[in-house]
Amino acid sequence: MAFEAPKIDYTGKIKEITLGTGNKAVKVGGSTSYPFYLFEGQMPNPPRIAMEVFDFAPDDWAEAAVEPFKDVIGDPVAWAKKNIQEYGAEMIALQLRSIDPNGLNRSANEAAATAKRVIDAVDVPVILWGVANHEKDTEVLRLIAESCEGKNLALGPVEEEDYKQIGASAIAYKHTVIASSPIDINLAKQLNILLDNLGVPGNKIIVDPTTGALGYGLEYTYSVMERDRMAALTQEDEKLQYPLICNVGYEVWKTKEAKMKTGDDIKFGDSKKRGIIMECVTAMSLLLAGADILIMRHPESIKLIRKMITDLAS
């Protein structure tokens, strides 16, 4: 008698959401089964990767992370274009790190102007990622939302303390919000409910569960994402049926292990290979937990993960 693997009957479906506009718009979500469980359901839109761009030249990156972008790292527009033209980026994630009050503390007007130049220069969807300072993020993201009306940007992180202001701007100017909560499924659901009550359409919400890098809380993120997908797909919890986004590159490459130079400790081996592997392991783990969008940094990491997505989704 042939063995027949038991199959789960799914009663829920992840909402399908479109980012960007025109023929380069990207669709995410729409799955009717656990990640890559193509023998049990459908995955009409395989996970997507957004390539990271900073809105200023970072001075604390590992050498391996700087090397692919060293000719454009001081120009966010050129950086974004290189990601698209040379590395095939299908989305750009603009990290608005210059607005950090504990860093450069650039003005909202200056940061918004930089963001608009990047957005106008590319034809792929753009994700805007603030610094989780509610006052500064609100001021900057509202300016960007207004100046880029109808571009269908993804604005985040949107948290409970600032969801009304940023959410209202997203509604008014037709953008998507990234609902961010601190690795807790109940808090994630609560924020989704608040955004729904505010009037943010269900096809304009993406969930950021907060990402921990390999060795820095990855297992907690994985567990929350796994529970999220179980509730969404097998328990028909409509308030959790949203695509998931993970800010992988930023979290991985700020770790001590990714920044250590070759030779600092012989046990850690080659620094470039170490950082790339850390980013890949983190990204692959989060894909298996249910990530629909990964924000990544190093082109070689992205190349490897693209290959894994293609293999698993075919």
Image (cartoon, rainbow, N blue to C red):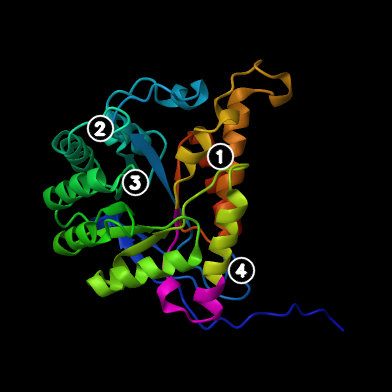
Q: Nearer the viewer, mark 3 or mark 1?
A: 3
Residue bearing mark 4: 37
Extent of the magenta region: 230-245
Residue bearing mark 3: 132
**What residue lies at 36% left-to-right and 68% top-to-bottom?**
192
Expressed as whole percent of the image width and height from the top left, the position of residue 59 reads: 39, 21
Q: Is residue 224 above or below residue 231?
A: above
Question: The C terminus appears in which quarter of the rendering?
Answer: bottom right
Q: Mark 3 or mark 1, which has the lower sequence index?
A: 3
Q: Amino acid at mark 4?
A: Tyr
Residue bearing mark 1: 279
Q: Mark 4 or mark 1, which has the lower sequence index?
A: 4
Q: Mark 4 or mark 2, which has the lower sequence index?
A: 4
Residue 156 falls left or right of residue 212: left
**What residue lies at 62% left-to-right and 53% top-to-bottom?**
219
Q: Is residue 28 magenta?
A: no
Q: Nearer the viewer, mark 4 or mark 3?
A: 3
Q: CA distance from mark 2 to mark 3?
A: 23 Å
Q: Is residue 125 above or below residue 103?
A: below
Within 10 angstroms of label 2, few (less than 14), some, or many (20 or more) residues?
A: many
Residue bearing mark 2: 77
**What residue lies at 62% left-to-right and 44% top-to-bottom?**
281
Q: CA distance from mark 3 to mark 1?
A: 22 Å
Label 1: element kind: helix
Q: CA distance from mark 4 to mark 3?
A: 34 Å
Quarter of the image for residue 80 reads top left
Q: Nearer the viewer, mark 2 or mark 1?
A: 1
